Image (tube, rainbow, N blue to C red):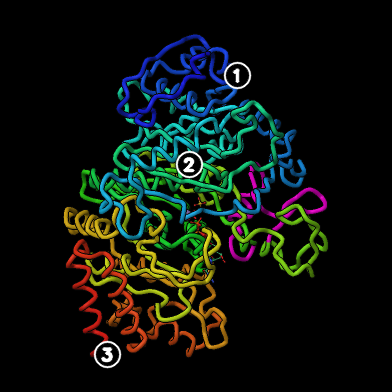
Amino acid sequence: MTALETTPDGDRTTARTGTGTGVGTGVRTGVRTGVSNDAAAVLGQATANPELLDWVRRTALLTQPDAVVWCDGSQEEHDRLTAQMVADGTLIALDPVKRPRSFLARSAPGDVARVEHRTFIASEREQDAGPTNNWREPAALRVELDEAFAGCMRGRTMYVVPFSMGPVGGPISQLGVQLTDSPYVVVSMRVMTRTGSAALAAITPGTPFVPAVHSVGYPLVAADGTTRPDVAWPCNPVKHVAHFPETREIWSFGSGYGGNALLGKKCFALRIASVMARDEGWLAEHMLILKVTTPAGRVHHLAAAFPSACGKTNLAMLQPSLPGWRVETIGDDIAWMRPGADGRLRAINPESGFFGVAPGTGPATNPVAVEMLRENVIFTNCALTEDGDVWWEGLTDEPPASLTDWRGEPWTPDSGRPAAHPNARFTVPAAQCPSLAEEFSDPDGVVIDAVLFGGRRRSNVPLVAESLDWGHGVFMGATISSEQTAAAEGTVGRLRHDPFAMLPFSGYHMADYFQHWLDVGAKLPTHGLPTVFSVNWFRRGDDGGFLWPGFGENARVLEWICGRLEGSAGARFSPLGHLPAEGALDVSGLDVSPADLAELFRVDPQAWLAEVDLLEAYFAGFGRKLPAEISGHLELLRYRLSGA
Ligand code: GTP
Ligand code: SPV
Ligand code: MN
């Protein structure tokens, strides 16, 4: 019996506290080594960090891969893995002229989005997960995970992917290592995070890193030795996306898709990082970051939280319709914000790529993204054209006459179903974004001047409103509701509360999270407090159509926001906060009737009083943890509405 056939020890999931044994030396990075023959050879090559080696060894003992490969993040490695996946049928190479160095992946039809009902927060105390999370008792969950992961990589390679969230070594950055049996995940992680040798070199003995284990859950060799062939998109009908907040660990099983599998993203940069941020006095948020330059040359940085598939990528890459205005992109999904020595909030985008929604991305809605996607893209669940390119709803007005849809079936415009999956995505390096701001790679981040909260609301919520103060701004974040999208499994269109657009992403009790936002604000000096706004691009008229043209025209809303920051734009009071004064929002040249404009800002007291009742019931679920300041703002809103 070799070492790897022994029963794995019970403490294997405690990588951060394990002492490590550091056996073996001498195997170079990226070289395949037969784990089952020579356990020692697996471990010593790329790092001398005993904790890291010990955790890799224990995970290999548990999951029993055929080989372990330490990834160096190089182009050669990327080329080798993509060539292998093309040969295996996991990737389709797109036409080298139409879409150079780009690929299409088609997922299994049952693995197309985040699985919120299988996402677990295993904090030691149930009250630390809170009512909006699926809590699991940590010891019981470890038993379940041990069963799922035992032998789950048989017949496969386990890749070791060291990565940094944020520039390696930056003051706001963090390190992680993902172990995965999916080469698709390896090449995607290389786009989305800073993977490879520099990150690995930074993980010196004693340096904290987040250990993240991922398996598609489709072993090729059974316990009794029988084998089965691989499939293009291996996954498992049973999925676990598990987080241990105290030990900062992630274990994900059964899915290869997006946030379920690219563990630096939602699992680390939001769920685990939100807990780190709570403990250390910073903020980990589901927010885009953009830089606006006004015609007068003044620069403002904005962070904006919208729920999944509600327009963060669009706003981050906005091309202003107003002359003289410029918007540059820093992030499209996640912001890590820390109070700086100057008392101001500084933000980085911890990612290095964009995993964006493809459908709806076209020359009219997001020309920057269309340009960005010209080459070096991994597309997932888009349709394939006859000439070897990709297509999705919204890329062109007229669909091609004949396509292969995201499931690999023939498709024509009268097929009566979408050609691309509604949650089809592109994975692309941020460096390719034509509007990328130079500050993107500044490890110290940018000073945030304003925070925006938004959702997809067909009624009630005005186009834009400014908060009355920080506490009211936190209340605005806490009271976001939004119509659900295809980014997660569930009922598309159903209105749900999604506080701070973090409902699926807060790694701890949502009411403690509200309190943390209040606390961070209380510690900042007045000059360091960003101004908070709420926005809604999605209000609809009686005919069901959008009242606001959106996209590039959202620059008009940014203009008013910047005007407020500079003290030049007029406002009027409403029960919901300050709205643009008559004439203060520039709508010149827009095809928006005065009646529609009025409707965009109409505050209906009866409808809002009903909404306050719903919020009160929702907040009651948080029990005694709900900050008094939040319930106070709800009462104040009710009071203002009653007088309106
Ligand atoms: P995740 O990556 O899932 O976190 O989402 P995201 O917020 O980055 O989503 P994205 O920007 O890709 O959202 C795209 C969706 O928002 C598409 O359905 C767009 O049509 C819609 N959208 C974005 N901006 C606007 C707008 O100004 N008006 C309208 N009506 N729709 C918009
Ligand atoms: C989201 O759902 O908010 C995303 C996509 O950004 S995923 O990374 O799959 O979670
Ligand atoms: Mn997101």
Ligand 1 has an atom within 8 Å of the beta carbon of the residue at disc 3? no
Query: In this view of the protein, can residue 290 be seen by the observer?
Result: no
x and y percentages locating residue 157 in the rendered image = 59, 27
**Which numbered dot is residue 252?**
2
Looking at the rendered image, the disc whose residue lies closer to the viewer, 1 or 3, is 1
Residue 133 covered by magenta stretch: no
Q: Position of residue 111 (x, y in %)?
A: 60, 51
Earlier along the polypeptide chain: callout 1 or callout 2? 1
x and y percentages locating residue 30 in the rendered image:
57, 21
**In front of the other: 574 or 516:** 516
Q: How many marks?
A: 3
Cβ atoms under marks 3 and 2 closer than 8 Å: no
Q: Quadrant of residue 616?
A: bottom left
Tell me which label, 3 or 2, sits earlier in the chain.
2
Q: Which mark is residue 32?
A: 1
Which labelled disc corresponds to residue 644? 3
Q: From the viewer's perspective, is residue 620 above or below residue 597? A: above
Query: What residue is rendered at 42% in x and 76% in y?
Result: 463
Classify 257 as above or below 194: below
Q: Which amino acid, by three-letter code, is at mark 1?
A: Arg
Q: Are marks 1 and 3 in contact (CB under 8 Å)?
A: no
Please state the extent of the stretch shown in magenta in the rendering: 363-392
